[in-house]
Image (spheres, rainbow, N blue to C red):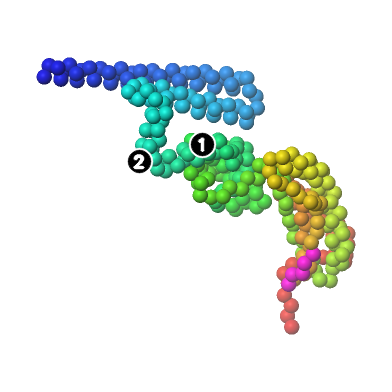
Amino acid sequence: MEYLSKMGFTISHMLWVKLISSVLIIILIYLINWITSRMVKRRISDPKTRFSAGKTIDYLSVAIGAILVGRLWFEGVQSLATYLGLVSAGLAISLKDIFVNLAGWIFILWRKPFALGNRIQIDSFSGDVIDIRPFQFTILEIGNWVNADQSTGRMIHIPNGIIFNSPISNYDSGFQYIWNEIPVLITFESDWQEAKKILQEIISVSALTTIQKAEKEIIESSKKFLIFYNNLSPKVYTSVEDSGILLTLRYLTQIRERRDGAENIWEQILIQFSEHSDINLAYPTYRRV
């Protein structure tokens, strides 16, 4: 009995030592993290770089703290690989969703399907990536009830595990431009050939600088991705609808300038069409017979 009592006291004493040591390790890691983060904030002025550096410091702090505390509590498990294997197995069995999200985080950091600042679409969500954490990433939503891919102001937190089940559209990776189309419907009585000529001149002038930049970017992107376009020139397509002749403008635009560019083009269209009495925009009408 006396032996068991002493053994119980020894175990209790060791438990308290481990608890106190764990708390001290966590406090020490926190202080080092806090000091390092403040030094980074003082020396780095660029917000994006500062944010990324802060996240890296946080991840390293958590990893180092987990290893130190884990080795303290698993002294009998000398192999770090065995320790990590036991932890991974336990998470896989009892915390499946958390494990999947953690695996998704590792995949995002390793394969980089998207990065901070990228504009993406995944499942039914679209937005700019503003944060990536071990269990979820956050986007600043675009679209939804707002037109032309502009921000709604909402932040959406998405579990990392979604990347294994849903396709990801990345607006920024590889090629920084998208094709946009503006439909212009004119009446059957209008001079559609003159209207098409006017529209072609408008988008050719407005897209000139964009095409030059896009051609250089395609050359760089083709070194990493199989991206090629034979023709980047804007074009106006002609088709016939029930209520008029449809002239569709197709042109390249920068990802975040879609609405501003469309507004500028529409203003030029309205100005130039107003100078031609034989060109009229079509709209729904009713005739009584």
Report the residue marked by disc 1: 106
Residue 28 bears which disc, if any? Answer: none
Which one is nearer the viewer's eye here, 141 or 98?
A: 98
Q: Residue at x 65, y 45 (%)?
A: 171
Q: Residue at x 45, y 42 (%)?
A: 100
Residue 241 lies within the magenta run? yes
Residue 268 in the image, given as x and y percentages of width and height: 82, 53
Q: Residue at x 87, y 67 (%)?
A: 191
Work out how far the residue at label 1 is from the one at label 2, CA to CA, in angstroms. 19 Å
Residue at the limit of the structure toward the left, as seen here: 1
Image side of residue 109 versus residue 270, left or right: left
Which one is nearer the viewer's eye here, 57 or 269?
A: 57
Image side of residue 108 versus residue 262, left or right: left
Residue 169 in the image, given as x and y percentages of width and height: 61, 48
Name the amino acid, label 1: Ile
Using the image, determine if residue 200 lies above or below residue 215. Answer: below
Using the image, determine if residue 2 lies above or below residue 194. Answer: above
Report the residue marked by disc 2: 94
Write the start and end of the magenta stretch as one range.
238-242
Using the image, determine if residue 60 lies above or below residue 188. Answer: above
Q: Secondary structure at mark 2?
A: helix
The majority secondary structure of the magenta stretch comes to: strand
